[in-house]
Image (spheres, helix red, strand yellow):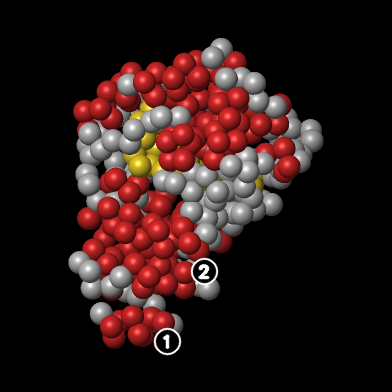
Amino acid sequence: MKKLLKSFFLEKKIFTKKEAKKIFFALYNGQINPIQAISIAIMYNFRRPTVEEINGFREALMDLCIKVNLHEFNAIDIVGTGGDGKNTFNISTLTCFIVAGSGEKVIKHGNFGFSSKYGSSDILTNLGYQFTKNENKLKKQLELTGFCYLHAPIFHPILKVVSYVRKQFGFRTLFNILSPLLNPVNPKNQLLGVSDLELARLYAYLYQDKNINFSIIHSLDGYDEITLTSDIKCYTSKEERIYTLEELGINKKINPIELSGGKTSEENTKIFLKILSGEGTISQTKVVLWNASFALSLINSDSIINNYERAKHTLESGQANTIFKKFINI
């Protein structure tokens, strides 16, 4: 292992799939420590991992994760890579409850914020949710609300080992790239937000070999979600294309300031609750609804415009908020 690490750091070695897999097994077995593991992860900020390396890292983490069987549900995971440095409010989490409120199933895999200030797990913790890995409870949540949440460190104990060190760095690492690939359930559908085009193309290539219905979205000004601050690049299994704001009926770009998250976790939670209760600003509401419309279209194959109206009704009728409250209290 020392020889392998030395060649990686000093000779810029590219791992084979087998060698990449060996790295995380070495961390699991105590052959390398969390600082060494994070150092490897940070090195990928200087070059993109290869497809072989990503598949090796992912296979190791999935082999080591706690399994849960929810395959009977035609569900979607809605997630972003993070690391775009934009500090938006929790768009993807809000999107999940609108999609679930619209009658679809959402199995979200998430974590606390590392490269961003506050992640999905921060919001849910603040609102009193108790993370669980109990399969029966997760299944019950899905059946009654259409939503369940998989807190990454519970299902991937190895992530908990590196979480403290990762938090100290506070910027994007290899784990941001890997996280969207690590949902223990492997839902049949995934809406993935990516912060740059090179990475979006890498995911599109990776997903071609996997049995998943996917949509990879990137706002061209650098956001890892649909923000209506610019046009949107979208990759699916069928095509890649750009959606202009004009064809979505958006006549004016949103000012990024209007999408800012809170300065504290509590402020961010208040923003979350306000939007979910239908009291968000016009800009906040539109952004969440368009993300939901893309997610819904991935599952039901209806047009994005029709699904926007469906998502709008779900939010305005209070159904999304009702689903959220029911979920928290199960």
Residue 31 lies, in percent from the top left, at 23, 73
Residue appearing at x 52%, y 38% in the figure: 92
Residue appearing at x 38%, y 81% in the figure: 8
Is 129 rendered above or below residue 51?
above
- Residue 73: image quadrant is top left
Q: Of marks 1 and 2, which one's residue comes earlier in the chain? A: 1
Asked whether 96 or 219 is in front, the reply is 96
Q: Is residue 240 left or right of residue 65?
A: right
Q: Is residue 221 left or right of residue 212?
A: right
Q: Amino acid at mark 2?
A: Asn
The numbered disc on residue 49 is none
Q: Secondary structure at mark 1?
A: helix
Residue 17 lies, in percent from the top left, at 30, 69
- Tags 1 and 2 touching, CB below 8 Å: no
Is 149 rendered above or below residue 196?
above
Residue 323 lies, in percent from the top left, at 44, 19
- Residue 5: image quadrant is bottom left
Asked whether 230 or 276 is in front, the reply is 276
**Is the C terminus in the top left, top right, bottom left or bottom right quadrant?**
top left
In space, the residues marked 1 and 2 are separated at their CA atoms by 16 Å
Residue appearing at x 23%, y 63% in the figure: 28
Q: Secondary structure at mark 2?
A: loop
Q: Is residue 205 left or right of residue 245?
A: left
Residue 91 lies, in percent from the top left, at 56, 37
**Is the N terminus in the top left, top right, bottom left or bottom right quadrant?**
bottom left
Which class describes the residues within 10 Å of circle 2: few (<14), some (14-19), or many (20+)? Answer: few
Q: Which residue is mark 1?
A: 10
Residue 121, visible in the rendered structure: yes
Q: Which residue is mark 2?
A: 45
Residue furthest to the right: 252
